[in-house]
Amino acid sequence: MIPKPMLAQLRRELPVGGFIYEPKWDGLRCIAAAAADGTIALVSRHGRPLGRYFPEVVSAVRSLGRALMLDGELVIAGERGFDFAALLSRVHPSSTRVAQLSGKTPASFVAFDLIGIDDESLADRPFAERRARLVELLGGAAGGTLVATPATDDVDVARLWLARFTGRGIDGVVAKPRDLRYQPGKRAMIKVKRERTADCVVAGFRWFGDRPVIGSLLLGLYDGDELRHVGVTSSFTGARRAELLEELRGDVVPLAGHPWERGFGLGPSPMGRLPGAAGRWDPTQMTQDWIPLRPTRVVEVAYDHLDGQRFRHPARFVRWRPDREARSCKFDQLDVPSGEHPVHP
């Protein structure tokens, strides 16, 4: 039976003393299991089978010739950091398309834990021991399809990873006590993320379901004279949603003449209409589901990931910025990945 992966609790500072630190990869969490009969399974964090979508990873695990269970992350290296959108596009219903993409955008499996091998369960062994066994196992693996994650016990190196590579292939740093046992489904590890901020124009809002309060604010940044939609901020308390409506009521304007009257987010988007991705609205194809606002207010938001030049997840509202002119809010403030990696799988 394949266990649920061990999880991590979020903190803002790296813990010190008796920890092993690893990059937190920007990919798909995955358990890779090889049975004694050669059957290989790749299973997502939520129990979804992934093996058919990543045949090159299945082959790499099979080539080890061992019954084992690995915890790790599926990633695809792109020109500007690891490419999460390309990774999602690999999960395709067409077997022909899967075969084509496995050659065009091959994935790697970055392993960071060895849960068991042959007939031996390692779940109750200290993490430092599991880590040593993992490096021993994958040290001779050919190519870059299956690799052990880099790790260090030097907190200064971990801080460098956090400062230098967040957004450039990693999502932060994970800290694991040296004596940590593998605890399926438990938040037994620590993850640390560096928060990034941007000042964005608020150009509209959506209702909170069928309630007369604000559900999310639509955010934009200027690209020359064009105000481009980059995402939303939506994590508000019930009281704050009502307050925002009162604050913004006077900014409601007709659609005609608004920068997004002919739609927004209409360019190609590998993220599609996934929850949390920047919305896509085409007035010739969809019913308007948002309320236009005069694009003069500026808000500072905190974000984690970018997909291209859009926020992958809803950004966190930090504060209003009455000191900023809307036209000054441009894309040059986004921390766009440069393509540099802490490791090349």
Image: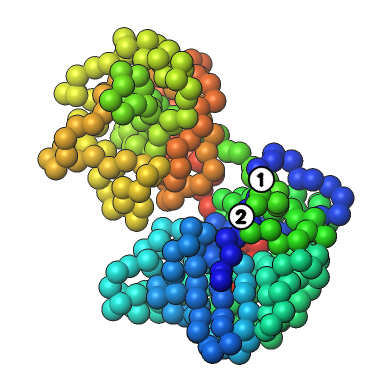
Dot 2, crowdedness within 10 Å: few (<14), some or many (≥20)?
few
Left or right, 254 with respect to 133, comes to left
Q: Secondary structure at mark 1?
A: strand
Q: Between 26 and 7, which is closer to the camera in this rendering? A: 7
Could you tell me which residue is drawn at 61 percent across and 39 percent down? 195
Q: Is residue 171 above or below residue 238?
A: below
Left or right, 278 with respect to 176, comes to left
Q: CA distance from mark 1 to mark 2?
A: 12 Å
Residue 147, given in percent of the width and then of the height, sits at: 63, 75
Residue 206, given in percent of the width and then of the height, sits at: 31, 27
Could you tell me which residue is drawn at 61 percent across and 90 percent down? 65
**Going by the picture, which residue comes out furthest to the left?**
284
Q: Is residue 105 above or below residue 233?
A: below
Q: Secondary structure at mark 2?
A: loop
**Looking at numbered disc 2 in the image, what kind of residue is underneath it?**
Gly
Residue 103, given in percent of the width and then of the height, sits at: 40, 79
Dot 1, crowdedness within 10 Å: few (<14), some or many (≥20)?
few
**Going by the picture, which residue comes out furthest to the right?**
17
What residue did someone put label 1 on? 9
Left or right, 285 with respect to 170, comes to left
Could you tell me which residue is drawn at 44 percent across and 20 percent down? 238
**Looking at numbered disc 1 in the image, what kind of residue is underneath it?**
Gln
What residue did someone put label 2 on? 185
Quarter where residue 298 is shown: top left
Q: Between 165 and 225, which is closer to the camera in this rendering? A: 165
